[in-house]
Amino acid sequence: MFMAALDNSIVSTALPRIGTEFESSNKVQLAFSCYVILSNAFQGLWGRSSNIFGPKPIVFVTIVIFVIGSVLAGASTSMEMFLVSRALIGMGAGGMFSLSSIIIAELVSVRDRGKYQGFISSVFAISALSGPVLGGTFVDKVTWRWCFYIQVALAVVTVPTMAIMLKLPRPKGSTVEKLKSIDWLGALLMAMVTLFLLLPTNLGGNLYPWNSPLIITSYVLAVLSAILFLHVEAKHAKQPIVPPYLWRNRNVTSLFSLNVFMGMTFWTLIFFLPIYFQIVVKETATAAGLAMIPLEVGIFISSYLAGVLITRYGKCLPYIYSGTGFTLLGIGLCLLLAQTPSKAIHLVVLFICGCGIGQLFPSLIVAIQASVDRKDIATVSALNFFFRMTGSGLGVAINGAIFQNRLAAALVQQGVPEAYAQLARLSAQRLGEIPDAYRGVVELVYLDSIRAVFRATIPMASAMFLLTFLVRHVHLGDK
């Protein structure tokens, strides 16, 4: 979990420098999109495979894929190679995230899962605290490539430790029989839905106009793939990746929907705050990483406390209410953050956001696992992450399009010459090359574009809060 979470936090600090080196700052958000698309495309397969083969061998497969992607990302010589590497990293990390929740469910009772999910969320927060600092140090002092090579060292520790220490039963049967029992057609269709939904959302309004044939065709294919996927799962699959009866469970559908908007809200902050601190506040990459610490401290404290309290009192719903409420408040206050250089206000606003988001990590996964039978725990755990990362991909894509469109339009309105406007769009870290007569205007345009992103995130956080009223309380027993 530390490896996968560290990748997310360390890369967010390095992306502005990577975009500058490859002269592709307008494509930086695609690095996140490639990660999310591949991370989500295989979630159903990881969840079903863990039931068929057992979680332990599947988690090793995901770690190997993750490390290979990290090595290739560090060795990238172009933005295209880097994007392919990020896709591989996402494929592996997606499995590592969901399988950690599945393994916890295998090892402890539903009542104790709150505490252990709190521990897992704390590990996430620790990695998020250290990631920006490490990433900023690598970017400023060595090279951004070490943001990825460091994963090899962590794998050298992780793989043998898990091989020796992790004891889990393995389902009986031959490998051939297990491979035949996997719903390969369902897995393929689920991957197609993810690809055709998220790819045009990321490309539209940025690299392609929204009314282009590619964007429209992709959305049509997403709808057709989704219809075909639901038909195959309901009528033909012997062991469906998503059993149809799950959609009739009110808590399951409500929590899946809530996870979509949580992903949209949380990852917008993770993606755009480093850009704000580096470009608008003019911090170094290291200082921008340090500026994210209040957010991660809030996540660390609130996730741990929520997990412990869930175990003690057997209730998830209060922390879902307070988590979404605090997050909505924090997102609203982010408009203040974009209007003042005060570090004290930055600290308070980010801490409030962290306190809200942190409570949701343990409470949502425990609530959804407690809402289904034991045989469906692996499936809903993987789908929980699937919907969260789908939301994150949509959130970053939508807000990325808003940011780029606002930036491009405002640069023209302010009369910035095309050469300097093009430089500002393609390479955020090269604003210093713009003459003083226009640099101040460009920086104000960046600030206004960031404000537009925060305003657009408020409805996403509001939808997340309103969805909590559809979730029913589930008693957490001791079995």
Image (spheres, rainbow, N blue to C red):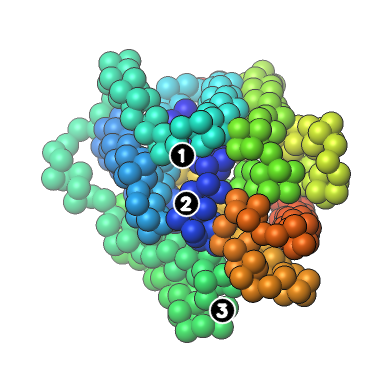
Circle 3 is placed at which residue position? 209
Instruction: Return the disc, 3 or 2, that comes first in the chain's sequence.
Output: 2
Q: Amino acid at mark 3?
A: Pro
Q: Amino acid at mark 2?
A: Glu
Any part of residue 235 in sight: no
Q: Secondary structure at mark 3?
A: loop
Of 362 and 146, the residue lying toward us: 146
Q: How many residues crowd mark 2 within 10 Å: few (<14), some (14–19), many (20+)?
A: some
Question: Residue 285 at what x, y percent from top left?
Answer: 60, 38
In the image, is 45 to the left or to the right of 315?
A: left
Any part of residue 219 in sight: yes
In the image, is 133 to the left or to the right of 273?
A: left
Q: Secondary structure at mark 2?
A: helix
Q: Residue 425 lies in what quarter of the image?
A: bottom right
Residue at point 41%, 57% (across, down): 79
- Of the two numbered discs 3 and 2 in the rendering, the one whose residue sits closer to the viewer: 2
Q: How many residues crowd mark 3 within 10 Å: few (<14), some (14–19), many (20+)?
A: some
The mark tally for this picture is 3
Circle 2 is placed at which residue position? 21
Question: Residue 127 at what x, y percent from top left?
Answer: 54, 28
Circle 1 is placed at which residue position? 144
Question: Residue 234 at what x, y percent from top left?
Answer: 39, 63
Instruction: Return the disc, 1 or 2, that comes first in the chain's sequence.
Output: 2
Residue at point 29%, 55% (across, down): 183
Marking on residue 349: none
Distance from disc 3 to disc 1, alpha carbons, whole Å, reads: 32 Å
Q: Are marks 1 and 2 in contact (CB under 8 Å)?
A: yes
Q: Secondary structure at mark 1?
A: loop
